Amino acid sequence: MKYWQPKFETMEHNELRELQLKRLKKTAAAVYDNVPFYREKFDSLGITPDDIKSVDDIKKLPTTRKTDLRDNYPFGLFAVPKKDIVRIHASSGTSGKPTVVGYTANDINTWADMMARNFTMVGLDANDTFQNAVNYGLFTGGMGFHYGIERLGAMAVPSGTGNTVRQIEMMEDFGVTAIHCTPSYGLYLAETVREMGIVDKLSLRVGCFGAEPWSSSTRKELESAFNIKAYDSYGLSEMMGPGIGFECQEQDGLHIWSDHYIVEILDENGEEVAEGEKGEIVLTSLTKEALPVIRYRTGDIARRLKSECACGRTTDRISRILGRADDMLIVRGINVFPSQIENVIVRIEKITDQFEIYLDRNKKKLDEITVKVELDEDAFTDDIQDLAKVRKVVEGELKSVLNIRANVELVEKGTIPRSTGKAKRVFDRREAI
Ligand code: ADP
Ligand code: ZN
């Protein structure tokens, strides 16, 4: 089967906009009537849900930020009584105190179908065996994927994270055909598969990776290490969790499920960017009941793509995430995204795929960036000249991508801690001085 819910996935443009309008009005009314935070925001702008006459009228509505969720922690933005909430999750807390999100039974149902759409889109079905190697706690990635796998009818292997050798044994023993984990854990699994030398014994076809940015070099690395196609899964707890945007088999940007979300890509002035341009992803939920969110400023940067796609789905489409605004490092006035560094490190030979970034301020009060990388075992010689050569290659490649000089520190393989979830790569020590 090609589509999970063909009616919504391939809906004709005008019909889709009509559906969005109907659902936007309903969502606006729900928050206006039930969430004091939004009622006040609407009132101070002098608008009511009745002012929404077209999808473009979304521009009149107030935006929501992560701080608004924090200020109303834990349940202040919920739009239904507590008896209707059947589950909560929380954000990972990458940029501060985790925010709490809630779900009604319908929300869980919608989410499961959305995930089943994603899996169908990348060619999976009830015959597949799907290992979900992410944390099953409050993090949305665990249960979010799990319910989708069951909805599809595939066999779920809820392996969670950790015990990496055992994870790979499970893949072999259970004939796992699809896996989900963070890209950084994927690289660690890949390294371990290589060390165990058993990739030929695995039946993997598909990998879904998400929850943090990952570069095209990492995609190549994961695809070759496991002999799979690697797909990008985008999501955020405020909008449900993973799977609100997903790649199709074209591997050319993310489909955002437009019957459930309106996506705006806004420039610094809050104006919609033109096709191909980049800006901040701003999302409005259209079907969420427990926690409807209006114009959520994700802080994630992407480009708007044209909506037509060879797969036949008519949803809005955006590029993969170029970075998140709070990840952006400013070094000597130049913007640096950790994913740019990842893209370089992963493709260079003689070093592993692991790295850490240190930011310091030197005696002249100038920023210094140091990238710590690990030598592969076979590159580890006593010959100082060999090491100098490796360092020079890495420094040269980084310079050409970042446009600033980065120091490179070579360390032994295994020195940098492997991550099983979202990796912490950046250590900013500038404030300390
Ligand atoms: P937190 O914001 O605390 O990390 P979440 O667990 O809700 O909490 O994570 C959502 C965020 O993770 C997104 O806003 C985005 O920055 C990042 N993210 C999720 N999926 C991807 C992806 N496929 N590519 C890049 N970044 C992603
Ligand atoms: Zn497509």
Image (cartoon, rainbow, N blue to C red):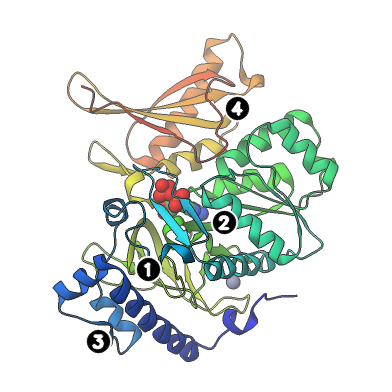
Q: Nearer the viewer, residue 248 or 369?
A: 248
Marks 2/3: CA distance?
37 Å
Res. 46 image quadrant: bottom left
The image position of residue 15, as x and y in percent, is: 49, 90
Would residue 50 appear left or right of 100 to someone viewing this image?
left
- The residue at label 2 has a CB less than 8 Å from ligand 1: yes
Q: Which mark is residue 350?
A: 4
Query: Is residue 231 at least partly visible in the picture?
Result: no
**To which residue does mark 2 refer?**
232
Q: Earlier in the sequence, mark 3 or mark 4?
A: 3
The outermost residue toward the top is 382
Q: Residue at x 70, y 41 (%)?
A: 225
Q: Quadrant of the N terminus?
A: bottom right
Q: Residues within 10 Å of mark 3 (few under 14, many from 20)?
A: few
Q: Nearer the viewer, mark 1 or mark 4?
A: 1
Marks 3/4: CA distance?
61 Å
Q: Earlier in the sequence, mark 1 or mark 4?
A: 1
Badge 2 amino acid: Asp
In the image, is residue 266 above or below residue 259? above
Q: Nearer the viewer, mark 3 or mark 1?
A: 1
Q: Which mark is residue 79?
A: 1
Q: Residue at x 39, y 73 (%)?
A: 275
Q: Nearer the viewer, mark 3 or mark 4?
A: 3
Badge 4 amino acid: Lys
Marks 2/1: CA distance?
31 Å
